[in-house]
Amino acid sequence: MPNQNKIANAIRFLSVDAVQRANSGHPGMPLGMADIATILWREFLQHNPHSPDWINRDRFILSNGHGSMLLYSLLHLTGYDLSIDDLRNFRQLHSKTPGHPEVGCAPGVETTTGPLGQGLANAVGMALAEKMLATQFNKPRFNIIDHYTYVFVGDGCLMEGISHEVASLAGTLGLGKLIVFWDNNSISIDGHTDGWFTEDVAKRFHSYNWHVVNDVDGHNPDAIRQAIIEAQAVDDKPTIICCKTIIGFGAPHMSNTHACHGSPLGEQEVAAMRNHLDWEYEPFIIPDEIYKLWDAKEKGKEQENVWQQAFALYHKQYPELAEELLRRVRGELTDNWGDKADDYIQATIDKIENLATRQSSQKALNAYGLVLPELLGGSADLTASNLTDWSGSKDITSSDFSGNYVHYGVREFGMFAMMNGISLHGGFIPYGGTFLVFAGYGQSAIRMAALMKQRVIYVFSHDSIGLGEDGPTHQPVEHLAMLRSIPNLSVWRPCDAVETAIAWQYAIERKNGPTALVLTRQKLLAQKHSEKNVKDIRRGAYILVDTGEVPDCILIATGSEVALAVTVATKLNMVGHKIRVVSMPSSDLFDKQDSIYKNTVLPPKVTKRIAIEAAASQSWYQYVGLNGKIIGLDRYGESAPEKILFEFFGFSEQNTTKLILGY
């Protein structure tokens, strides 16, 4: 029977051969972590290759995602639907094995990783979701939700600031089923890390309230095995296992150097490695006896069958809970969701209130939260400003995970990336709030949510110079344009309570990507909505004020500037002008409409157009044309009361009227 080294070497040679064939990739990490992966996947990991989406599977996250061939090799060897030809196709167009792991490409990939540290953050979110679902659904004798979240991280992951944000919170919450393996090889792209990474990581994680297993030989199977057993025995703290490894292990001339980190080893070094490790097989050839030792299909099927039998008994004893769990895991909304949402929107139309849209957002949460127990809220230490809590909010603490609200602390980036992990885990629809100006802190995690098509909701309040006296450091200017540039992120800037309620409804119902709700600090005038334009709000843009004739000029506005456009148009229309007002709460949704609708709202022959938005003008030229006008803000703001600022920057009746008449 092949020994432990030969079993691990199957990972090593699949990895180096795929990288060599692609002439691109990162062989060093798979070579260095192959021994750890072998022990974890063959002896501890609860998973079923036949059923990659089994809800109670252990989650395995490769935060150092550049070493993707480690994961692809594991998935192939253990029996997932990832063939040897898929490995041969590594890093090729439309392959199931892209350069970094991507959700939806290969079964068994839990999250898209590559931007270092974010996989760790996703894992913290997954571990939190596991703990919350277990609290909500487990019953005596029925641990229906009971799994671990395992994470591989590298030196680079721990250098990234996000690792501090999420490790700190994970320790505070005591997420005992989170187990992290640190690949401590002291090498990064630039070379040996002793010039830029010298902190005592063990002490650092001790200070976070983690259990630390230090100085584990990452190439000693017994040491690795005992470390995992020790980690599993600690249920009130997350664990980090500090594994001392050799990057490029087995490459006789390149191991323990940065040369093997991000480049193919080269034909000569691969051949030398075959001799050095006594691997007599040609590229992509794995002997049957090794395949049999790796194959996890039967074991995984047995593990899931045991769970299914327990769940059948659970379903018999707790049928409502069982059905509720299945509904939430499937991502389906409650049966009464549609009617309740429509009723609330109609009530909002009937009750005209002048509110800040952050207040309108909170009112929507008070209605929708009663219908959807899967809504999991939070804020980056700005709850009272974002108004992300509601009457049914209950805080999650280290001693009580039965709640539905996370205090993320001042950790915007960590919050966004944890929300991705919560969404990926299943069972929750996460939403989290901060000021719009801080969207830039977490932009990379927002981008990853859009790339992974996750149902995540961002509540961005204090959306413009309307926040007033806090000044330009807190007044977002470029952020709307930045968010709108992210593919598959839907951005909504509603003008009143009705648009806000519909924006929330859209965000909750959207299953194929994240949504950003951009909200005001200051009160806004409520608009009068007809039955028709309420339907058209759901199309991203609609005619709010019209004259019944072909307009002379079209004003396009969002958010707080809609009321200004309506006021100016109404006054000019009273004296014989023909001014149309188009409210465009979501330009990306409007862009998806058919040409007939778009041309109805913005007739091509009406070229006299003015866009009004208290933000950068960059994204508006596609709607007003090169000869159109924009009342925007292409500079930083000032510190003053909001009414003075709007007047100073030209967001006034006088300036808007003057621009229309002088067009």
Image (cartoon, helix red, strand yellow):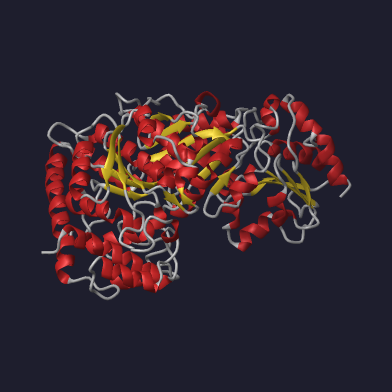
Q: Which residue is at a point 37% across and 63% down the rendered structure image?
A: 253
Residue extending farthest to the right is 662
User: Where's residue 29, x and y in %?
Assistant: 36, 55
User: Where's residue 136, x and y in %?
Assistant: 26, 33
User: Where's residue 254, x and y in %?
Assistant: 39, 61
Q: Quadrant of residue 430?
A: top left
Q: Which residue is at a point 35% across and 61% down the rendered structure image?
A: 69
User: Where's residue 87, x and y in %?
Assistant: 33, 69
Q: Which quadrant would the N terminus be assigned to in this image?
A: bottom left
Task: In the rendered view, tell whether residue 227 sits above or below residue 40.
Answer: above
For residue 436, side relative to residue 555 (left or right)? left
For residue 467, side relative to residue 187 (left or right)? right
Q: Can the viewer see residue 57 in this picture?
A: yes
Q: How many marks?
A: 0
Q: Which residue is at a point 37% across and 29% down the rendered structure image?
A: 208
Task: In the rendered view, tell whether residue 531 sits above or below residue 356.
Answer: below
Front-most of residues 544 and 310: 310
Q: Quadrant of residue 158?
A: top left
Q: Which residue is at a point 71% across and 45% down the rendered structure image?
A: 616
Q: Can the viewer see residue 339 in this picture?
A: no
For residue 659, side relative to residue 177 (left or right)? right
For residue 238, side relative to residue 492 (left or right)? left
Q: Quadrant of residue 528?
A: top right
Residue extending farthest to the front is 253
Front-most of residues 103 and 223: 223
Task: In the rendered view, tell whether residue 123 sits above or below residue 267.
Answer: above
